[in-house]
Image (cartoon, rainbow, N blue to C red):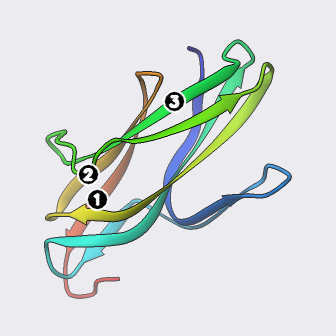
Amino acid sequence: MTMEVAYAFLADAATVDAGGKLNALGIFDSILVRNFPANHSRLYVVMSLRSWGTEAGTHRLKLLYVDADGTPLLPPIEHDFVVPGRAASQKVIVEVNGLPLPGPGPYSFEAAVDGHHIVSVPLNVTGGQAAV
């Protein structure tokens, strides 16, 4: 597999319009939480995967949300996508609801395509009084 990750990030909202243009709102990599444990109601994991035409067909993206020790905190999120038989940029948007935040620290979304790790998308969680 020769797909490359062009970018990967977390956002409050994300869509792809009819022309293939990505629209993202509220891109972030950290959350400030007042009290633990907490839940983040909704976020989107956004990625762009570049392919060169040799990867044509259906592929499976698997996302694991893990803590600093690599322990999964949600069941795996799986998302199928189709790659055309030509060089292309495949935008993948995965909605995640009810994200558990058991305490402060580093978390991440570990992404794999067809069983091959492709990217880690970090999320830093801190505690404090000025929570959003």
Q: Mark 1 vs mark 3: which is more N-terminal?
A: 3
Q: Nearer the viewer, residue 114 or 131?
A: 114
Mark carried by residue 107? 2
Q: CA gap, disc 2 to disc 1?
A: 6 Å
Q: Is residue 99 left or right of residue 104?
A: right
Image quarter of residue 43? bottom left
Residue 28 quadrant: bottom left
| Residue denoted by label 1 | 124
Q: Amino acid at mark 2?
A: Tyr
Image point (75%, 17%), residue name: 53
Q: Residue at x 68, y 24 (%)?
A: 51
Q: Check disc 1 and give the amino acid type.
A: Asn
Do the residues under discs 2 and 1 have CB atoms within 8 angstroms?
Answer: yes
Relative vertical location of residue 26 with respect to residue 86 in this rendering, above or below: below
| Cα–Cα span, label 2 and label 3 | 22 Å
- In the rendered image, the vertical position of residue 78 relative to residue 118, given as above or below: below
Badge 3 amino acid: Arg
Lateral position of residue 80 relative to residue 108, left or right = right
Q: Secondary structure at mark 3?
A: strand
* Spot occupied by residue 85 in the image (x, y as percentages of width and height): 78, 19
Q: Please give the residue where the numbered disc 3 appears in the rendered image.
A: 60
Give the structural element (helix, strand or loop) at label 1: strand
Local secondary structure at mark 2: strand
